[in-house]
Amino acid sequence: MRKLIGKSVGLLVVAALLLSSSPTFAAPMPEKKIGVLLIGFGEPEKYDADAYVGWKNFLSNYMSAGMRMMGMSFMYPLVKEMMLPMLDGGTLLVDKDDPFASGPKEHPNLIDAWGRPYRGKDYRWVSIPEGEFPMLGPLFSYYLATDGRGAGESDFWEYFGLMMYGYYQYMDNHNPGDERELGLMDEVEAKLRQKYGDKIIIGRGFGAARPGFPDFRAAAEELVNQGVTDLVLAEAYICFSEFEHPATEIEQYLEEEGLDVNIVIADQIGGTRPFSLGVAKKVAEELQNIPQDSDVVVFLSHHGMMNFNMSLWGIGYDWTKEPYHYRAKVAFEGAKKAISDLDVVKDWQGKIDVWQIYAEFVEGIMDPGDAILSVEEAAEIASKQGYRYCIDIPYEVGNSGFETLIGLRGCWGIEPPSWQEYYESGLRKYRSTTRYDGIKVIITDGWIDGAVEGYYQQVLRAIDSI
């Protein structure tokens, strides 16, 4: 057997030498064609019928990713195509003037999940505390009509849509996440075109797919169909996660479709030098307004991720090993070092500390070992240690309107809408101040000046690796 293998290898070597020395048999190398797919969340700027479609697709992607991670991919088609459609009582409605009303009104101004008025009369009040609605929270009550556009649509999707509608009204029907993410992509695309011209093809894909915002899988397929041989997948995210990581889904999708392309994944923005310096800049700006002998704690706030081992319950996923936790630490450590290197921090007469905070998923059973600080836990510790100022920078989800304007502020007990708006560098920005047990808390806007350059650098590194 060894002799046969040796002879076969020898013949292959001879054949290769003959082919390489003969111009008759020389096959031309396929021309490289590089594509770059800029990937974003795509959160709708305003709430309308398209926004309903976008948020439905967004949540659907989350459900699919979660089940895939837990080794239960087979469940997703059953849930989406069979279980959810069974939840259909008609058309869910809320009072446009009070979307989160705790009780019924005699003549409500009703609107459905698509943002359209409901003129019918056949509806009733459904009180969630008395009834049941699966999987979603925080729970709120609603009106239910047997007719209307929602008849035939799962109540699950309608409920989620109406919840987002209410959030949008808190934000004056303007989600800043859209314009900020698109601005980030616009600037990076302009830089790439200036450097490479028509040598590369650039596309965009989004998690909240809707008209004008193509699904990231479809967008990748379109680039491959244009002849791209090497595809850079560049997520415009501060921190990567397995739970929300379109690049892995695109890779799997293209393989299933039989499309052959070399995939290169650009790294996250968080942890890059420009981004870290941008975070430090925000701290320096806030310290100008604080007495130099004050004790100050800086909260660098993340969206958050669960931190417990589900495999202990036989479900099959250890969230403590979720890459998000490592990726978030990379972003945090980079920003913390940049803050500590500031001259104003080195010369500060009081105490200054920088803590990593998760806004959600780390209370109680979500973080049984108390390995990660929630806003509430950190605020309590800061108060006991005598800090008098807290600078809270939502640097990971700063571009996501409801996550910061409502979610993060809710952790501090701030009821929406309660923030100051101002314009800077063409962006509408948001700032809040509150007090917590003797601490003056400043919640800054989440836009980080170095995000564009950090994103651009990561795309360049990916292109250079091809």
Image (cartoon, rainbow, N blue to C red):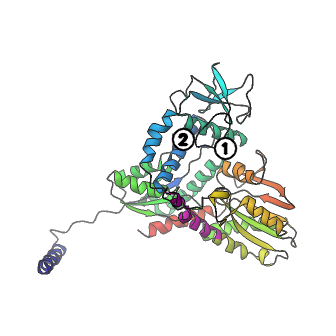
Q: Earlier in the sequence, mark 1 or mark 2?
A: 2
Q: Quadrant of the N terminus?
A: bottom left
Residue 418 screen position, x and y as percent: 79, 47
**Residue pictured at 67% horizontal, 58% vertical:** 364
The residue singled out by tag 2 in the image is: 56
- Crowding around mark 2 (Cα neighbors within 10 Å: few <14, some 14 to 19, many 20+) is many
Q: Position of residue 162 (x, y in %)?
A: 63, 36
Task: Say if residue 2 shows up in the picture.
Answer: yes
Q: Is 329 one of the magenta-colored residues? A: yes
Residue sticking out furthest to the front: 313
Q: Which residue is mark 1?
A: 138
Q: Is residue 37 visible?
A: no
Query: Looking at the image, which residue is at 76% across and 44% down?
Result: 417
Q: How many other residues sit within 10 Å of disc 1, few (<14), some (14-19) or many (≥20)?
A: few
The x, y position of residue 47, in whole percent, is 63, 38
When asked about the image quadrant of residue 19, the answer is: bottom left
Where, by quadrant of the figure, is residue 198 drawn? Answer: bottom left
* Camera-side residue of 158 and 445: 158
Q: Position of residue 177 (x, y in %)?
A: 63, 50
Secondary structure of residue under mark 1: loop
What residue range appears in magenta? 303-332
